[in-house]
Image (spheres, rainbow, N blue to C red):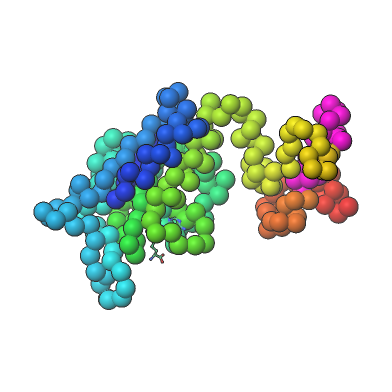
Amino acid sequence: MRFDILTLFPEMFRGPFEESIIRRAQDKGLISIGLHQIRAYALDKHHTVDDAPYGGGAGMVMKPEPLAACIEHARRCNPKALVVAACPTGERFSQRVAAELSEAAGLIILCGRYEGIDERVRKLLVDRSISIGDYVLSGGELAAMVMVDAVTRLLPGALGSEESARSDSFSDGLLEYPQYTRPPRFRDLAVPDVLLSGDHARIGQWRRREALRRTLAIRPDLLREADLSAADRHMLAE
Ligand code: SAM
């Protein structure tokens, strides 16, 4: 998948995209990432990308002309891509949205700054506006990194094992069960016996119960949407 990121701060991406799974996914040819400096598409000699909001009020708004030109350029590099704007007023990002985006032919991600983008750019050129949570960041760059990371993990071949993406939190609508590794005892806390038993059916049941318990305790809202079996409901009622 090709990602094109439109930003006033392309340097912010250099370190994060050169490490770990995102680095390996690029090395394997599973993804490629284009970074585009929006300011390069400004029309005046001062490279102005923002202007005062109509109607008054604090802050500045990103001007439509450089944004539109930059999106149109990215579209030529990534012709079938979905255009996503990082925006606190957008739909909430989730594992489901990441899975939907992972099916796209490519993604163009627009990173806002200041008070955000001129609404006409959204209406004319943006397919989806996405918020990564109910808080306000200074810019869309961190949101774009979150989306690229979450989407890349879902691409076949990006992780060491396909199993790890399937068992991650939210993939089945629940939080993941607790994980343990060696040593078997750490500061008086032992690994649950069942995990040392080698009995994969019992381990599976234990993990499911713990995932259900944890989700009930921390994110009961997720249980409303989760696909629960009769056995799951029984475990929850215990
Ligand atoms: N005035 C805007 C508002 O209240 O909705 C906030 C603008 S914010 C300071 C600047 C940019 O950061 C936004 O245009 C967007 O690209 C990005 N941003 C901030 N919070 C975000 C969030 N929760 N999810 C995605 N992008 C966000």
Q: Which residue is drawn at 45% across and 23% down?
A: 28
Q: Residue drawn 25% across and 72% down?
A: 54
Q: Is residue 39 visible?
A: yes
Q: Is residue 176 above or below residue 50?
A: above
**Is 117 displayed left or right of 27 in the figure?**
left
Magenta-span inclusion, residue 197: yes
Q: Please, is residue 207 above or below residue 134 in the view?
A: above
Q: In the rendered picture of this protein, how many numbered marks are placed on residues? A: 0
Residue 85 rendering spot, x and y as whole percentages: 38, 52
Q: Is residue 37 magenta?
A: no
Image quadrant of ligand 1?
A: bottom left
Where in the figure is residue 66, as x and y percent of width and height?
A: 22, 52
Rendered location of residue 36, percent (x, y): 28, 42
**Residue ID at (58%, 26%):** 160
Q: In this view, does 98 lie to the left or right of 220?
A: left
Q: Quadrant of the N terminus?
A: top left
At x 86%, y 54%, the residue is 237
Characterize the magenta stretch by its predominant secondary structure: helix
Q: Nearer the viewer, residue 107 or 43?
A: 43
- Range shown magenta: 193-212
The residue sitting at the bottom extreme is 56
Task: Name the one closer to the observer, 73 or 60.
Answer: 60
Q: As drawn, is 231 to the left or to the right of 62?
A: right
